Amino acid sequence: MHAQSWSGGCNCSKLRYTLKAEPMVVHCCHCTQCQRMTGSGFVINGVIETSNVEIKTGSLKAFNLPSETGRKLIVYRCAECGTDIHTDYGGRETMIFVRMTTLDDPTRFGPDVHIFTRSKLPWISLPPQVPAYEAFYPTFEEVWTSEALQRRRALGF
Ligand SMILES: [Zn+2]
Ligand SMILES: [Zn+2]
């Protein structure tokens, strides 16, 4: 489908990975959990099949975090330096959320949607042309392209 790939890694450079496909959708998440996890204003997550993320060097360490919804939340960090690389929301294993700003080109995949804007920091302004939701969006059809929905269905979700 796409011959192109995109590389990224952690702060100590021991962990290197490649995305073998574009993310299905890119979330900019302003929830309090993402803010606390990073000590920052928001997180940019590319939703992608786990099979399309190839770890080239280094290793990941899994951290189980409590989540407000009670669903599983596993954060995978560089085992050496602790940089967040991706997250598994719900313990689905085959679909993960990669931190887009760990890519060598962090500008490559910008947000398709802003979510949990109810806790967005007041001094951050959002562009009017990108959809934004107070919490999570009500239906996937509203945000995901039909190609992305097909990829999601192929995973059984
Ligand atoms: Zn590292
Ligand atoms: Zn979040």
Image (tube, rainbow, N blue to C red):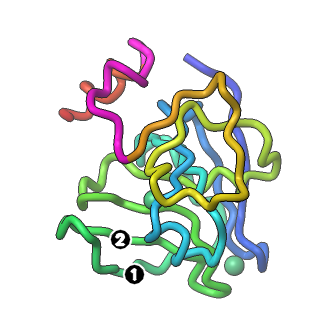
Which quadrant of the figure contains the C terminus?
Answer: top left
Instruction: Determine which residue is flagged by label 1.
Output: 63
Q: Are marks 1 and 2 in contact (CB under 8 Å)?
A: yes
Numbered mark located on residue 139 in the image: none
The amino acid beneath tag 2 is: Ile
Residue 32 position within the rendered picture, expressed as x and y whole percent measured from the top left: 46, 69
Q: Which of 73 and 92 lies nearest the eye of the viewer? A: 73
Q: Quadrant of ligand 1?
A: bottom right
* Kind of residue at badge 1: Phe
Q: Main secondary structure of the magenta part?
A: loop
Q: Is residue 141 magenta?
A: yes
Q: Which residues are magenta?
A: 135-147
The answer to whether residue 1 is above or below residue 8 is above
- The residue wearing badge 2 is 74
Position of residue 67 measured from the top left corner of the image (x, y, whole percent): 28, 72
In the picture, measured across the screen, residue 129 lies left or right of residue 115, that is: right
